[in-house]
Amino acid sequence: MAYRIERVILRQIRMPLVHFFETSFGRTYERVIVLVEVQSEGRSGWGEVTAGEHPFYNEEWTDSIWPLLRDYVAPRVTATPIQSADDVFDRTSAIRGHFMARGGAEAAIWDLEARRAGVPLAKHIGGTRTEMFCGVSIGIQDSVGQLLAKIETELAAGYQRIKIKIKPGWDVDVVREVRKTFPSIRLMADANSAYTLADADHLRRLDEFHLMMIEQPLAHDDIIDHAKLQAQLQTPLCLDECIRTPRHAEQAIEMHACGIINIKLGRVGGFRQARRIHDIAQAHGIPVWCGGMLEAGIGRAHNIALSTLPNFVLPGDVSASKRYWKRDIIQPAIEVSSRGTIQVPAGPGFGYDIDTDYLRSITVREETIA
Ligand code: OSB
Ligand code: MG
């Protein structure tokens, strides 16, 4: 049953974070997020573009998304009827990169299609789980004491694993303190490309702390150096920034550049590519987990659907709305059980309602492409 996307509505919203979030490339106090609404036959589907405010995680940022979606993606998805959301990634394949902008629109169309069919998005993408496992990502803090206090709070809330951000000067000594205080928790570290292969000896000092994995220590675009580093470490590497396409996943696995893959919907261009990467990893016995990009509720709800695919066997970075927002843009807010799980909603589409009053109040830019 083909359907036509009649309208694409872009919105930019501003939302202050409850706590700042610091990675090796800087601090974020407020998110500026682009949302994509697609309309067809009186129904809407919603997507969230996961790019940051600056082109530091990848090349996309808040201001690159708008013209890309308006001038390149919207014309391609409205031109002719959609046969299946699974074809949408290919419609935009003439565009090099810009996976987050393209993925935001693709995810909106998956949501719309699931709502048309009256099924949960999780089921529509082929997911099987009814609950997903949650960890938290804790940014770089002003002191180790603050970090230990935050970890304590998150463990008490039930989260199943703790990820801390590291960078040169905030790494081995910090991890040692965390391990001393919490000897048996599931712990990992994410460097967001803050090191080079010249730091291999230094990074090897992390082996004694039995981390579940070290995420993306080296350059955002260098699978080969990660393979060289992995050969010198006991701790499994997990790739985030490096894996943008299914082919990258195949190459990284073939070269033993990682033992685990973090899948982010935006980074790879949406559900179709995410599922392919998931399937490749599964076929090779490589576990995956769902990463986060400080999403508001819509992106978070899409991440929950993605995490229902069977090879999402490790706790990811998708956690409760209240860790980020005083008020989320969806209702109800996303909650995490005391066992550190999120119940996958059973309603059609991504399964939450848009809080339209709140959304209107935080919208700073809007444009309709018909
Ligand atoms: O590398 O996983 C990352 C946030 C912004 C950019 C990159 C990353 C992150 C996180 C936060 O780790 C995950 C989250 O809580 O959404
Ligand atoms: Mg990461």
Image (tube, rainbow, N blue to C red):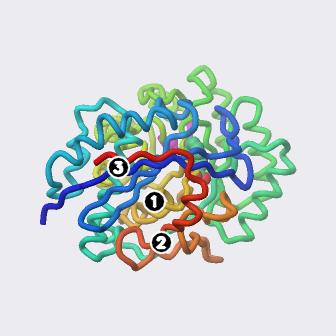
Distance from disc 2 to disc 3, alpha carbons, whole Å, reads 18 Å
Q: Quadrant of ligand 2?
A: top right
Which residue is identified by label 1? 303
Badge nearest the viewer, 1 or 3: 3
> Which is nearer the eye, 53 or 10?
10
Task: Say what amino acid the circle numbered 3 marks.
Answer: Ala
Residue ranking furthest to the bottom: 346
> Which is nearer the eye, 71 or 170?
71
Which range is magenta?
233-239
Which residue is identified by label 2? 353
- Residue at the image position 15 percent from the left and 54 percent from the top: 81
Rendered location of residue 94, percent (x, y): 23, 32
Rendered location of residue 311, percent (x, y): 38, 61
> Which is nearer the eye, 361 or 180?
361
Q: Is residue 75 magenta?
A: no
Q: Is residue 75 above or below residue 43?
A: above
Q: Is residue 261 above or below residue 66?
A: below
Distance from disc 2 to disc 1, alpha carbons, whole Å, reads 16 Å
Which residue is identified by label 3? 105
